Amino acid sequence: MLIFPCFLLLLYVSIFSSYSIVANTITSNKSITDGETITSPGGVFELGFFGNESRYLGVWYKNISSHNIVWVANKDRPLTDSSGVSRIDSHGNLVLVDRNGSLLWSSNISSTAPDSVAELLDSGNLILSNNNSANPDSYLWQSFDFPSNTLLPGMKLGWTLNDGLNRYLTSWKSETDPSQGEFTVGFENHLLPQIVVRKRSIKYNRIGPYNGISFSGAGEFRGVLYKPSFIFNKNEVYYEEEPADNSVIIRFELNPYGFFEHLTWDYQFQNWSLWYSLETNRCGYNMCGENTLCKFNYSNSMPDCECLNGYTPKSPKGWSLLNYSGGCVPIPQLNFGKEDKFELLPRVQLPDILHYWLNTSINLEDCEAECLRNFSCMAYANSDILTSSGCILWFDNLVDIQQFDDEGQDLYVRVGTLELESNKESKKKESRQPTDEIKIILPAVSALLVFGLIVGYILLNKTYYRKGRNIVNNQDLASSSLEEELELPLYDLATIATATNNFSLSNKIGCSTDGARNCNKKLSKNSRQGFQEFKNEVVLTSSLQHRNLVRLLGCCIQGEERILIYEYMPNKSLNSIIFDGTNSVKLNWKRRFSIIVGIARGLLYLHQDSRLRVIHRDLKASNILLDSQMNPKISDFGIARTFVGDQTEENTKRVVGTYGYISPEYAKCGLFSIKSDVFSFGVLVLEIVSGKTNRYIPHVDHHLNLLGHAWTLLTEGKALELMDPSIEDPVTLSEVLKCIQVTLLCVQKFPKDRPKMSSVLVMLDTDGLMLPWPKQPGFFVQDDLSATQNEALTRNDCDYAEVCERRMEFKEGQEVEVLYEKNGFKDTWYLAKIYRLYSA
């Protein structure tokens, strides 16, 4: 009687054991196909296939709503269908094959292990071991030794010196393409390890050498939510971390744009929160050039470059245009000798470890003496600040020194004798008394000065009668100066006039004599833009290089004419399509979404990635040009501004821009920042989605503008009603809804609530991401037009008098949105007509 129950029990145990192996491991008897997965014992991670047209084998978080891929096997050899199989082969390797049995990826172990088992651990580590051994030393292979773009807790970033194993991260090509991207991050230099991000083979960013406590200039990289550790001995050089609390989920990621970011999972908002980025509040690698100090204030987004003491800019003209890449060179005839002194630079990231000497046994005083003995030694510092010992000497040019407010370490830079002697001479001159020769010459000089003033007064009066001619001459001189400053062709006016049939309206797009197609922008003689604005656009457009920025081919400055020559854009501007009922059908949803992402990438470049950190200030549909493939190009930098020094924002008394796109803080207080461009971007995206301008009043029973109408529909769960009806299928409704929610995050009333463009791109590129709920947008309410349309504004009508005093760039009688106080309610925007402009 007991035989049959025992048989059933054995059968149950056998089935359960088999199920456990299927759920957690891959063996020689059990493989997984596309659609099947294995899960780590605690259900933290999952291994399986992912992707759309291309299929990959990878590991991702199982119980997090944003299933971020943390490891990919066949990143450069994707499957083209769902026929993939992952199994253990006859040699004990974990392999991936397609329907024809062709090998796409292998663990490639050196020895044969037919009884090997592949298991996914709760750490996210995919291991290959004999008989499912839990001892890490017995692993035949592990995915942690071959990272993709993510560093997980317990994973090592660095070197094993005895076998030459180098663990480094490689970015994806894009947010959806896991193939090898342009960026890598890992350790350089076994004697003085430092973390370096490279773009292909070129250094892109770095954290300075290890100094006994942390990495020079690492700042928040030291961690608060996690416990970092750095192992540095004769066998290994690596960094790893563990969360300070087991409930905290953390990871490092190298994204496709080269940002090395530390992320933590936000349980409340169900998304990844950026804790630290290597690019945050830092200068890019050698951004200011050699022998410079790059200061980057935490509240700013633009570096402040200065030459080290005893050096001068290599290209003064370049520095005047905020192009510091040439760096600095020693002052002519600067001598270095044993009498030199050293200037202390506190709180810096130490220079790059290029030409150096290291001695770990001497103190700082002996280090200075060693540097003095060698005239090629330019700086020194402690190698270990924990024990205040060790010595590093730098020779030749000093590269990539960055200074911070509250981190970094001391660096001592050599100051030559010429600099010291010049200071002594200047002090001597200050103490000298006038000689008898000066007393004799002084009256004669005074007489000549009086005579010069009289002659100058006569000539100045004559210039009033020749003002027009002088303006032409000055602009010709400016043209010559501009040609010297920029490597940009200057075209003759006659050539451009011929190409455009004397600027005929029927021939707005002209051809140059060599047959190349281009677009000419001719400023009207009545334009309020002067030569400075024109020069600003030339300098910025020629200095910025990005696929989503229009390319400037040349310019013309002749007489009173100011002409810009851009690359040819066959599809003209965005507003000529999306606001035209006939042309709007050319843009299906896929193209519109691609345009939105392209504009976002262009803005991110302007705000964060370019050498010149630029605020556009006039982002709108008519300033987005479209090439033959409908790729967007941001244009018109005439009123753009760059941020320098310790600025986080700037105040101007001359508010310029376009009604409907200007942010509230800019129009009201004259304050602009990168968040002003974010607001304009939000307006622009909503116009692309809806096909309507922000001034459009969708309903006769209320006076909300497009932003207010969009926010109301979102709160009512009807956001998709905003979508342009001319958009033809197929439409990805989730993307449409995401764009509407992102745009409302961008147009929130207060700048601090708006996301940066880096966050905007993450939101646009990431599927399934839980987005924050937007607050009420700026310019939400508009009063009854009939009650305000005929009112002339006075100083008492303004909420802030400066609004009337800023000589706003609008013509008399033009409808504009102006902030003023009515019935005691502030921060309310009304549509009114301007009948006269007030000035201070």
Image: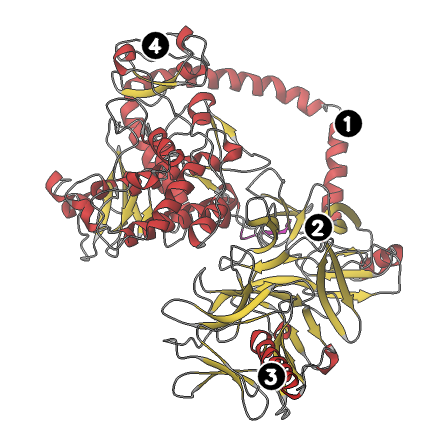
Provide the residue designation for mark 4. 793
Q: Secondary structure at mark 4?
A: loop
Q: Nearer the viewer, mark 2 or mark 4?
A: 2
Give the residue type that dot 3 points to. Answer: Leu
Per the rendering, the mark at residue 11 is 3
Per the rendering, the mark at residue 158 is none
Q: Residues within 10 Å of mark 1 (few under 14, many from 20)?
A: few
Main SS type for the magenta part?
loop
Per the rendering, the mark at residue 431 is 1
Residue 521 versus residue 56: which sits nearer the camera?
Answer: 56
Q: Nearer the viewer, mark 1 or mark 3?
A: 3
Q: Secondary structure at mark 1?
A: helix
Provide the residue designation for mark 2. 225
Q: Label 3 near label 1: C-beta < 8 Å?
A: no
Q: CA distance from mark 3 to mark 2?
A: 48 Å
Residue 326 magenta-highlighted? yes
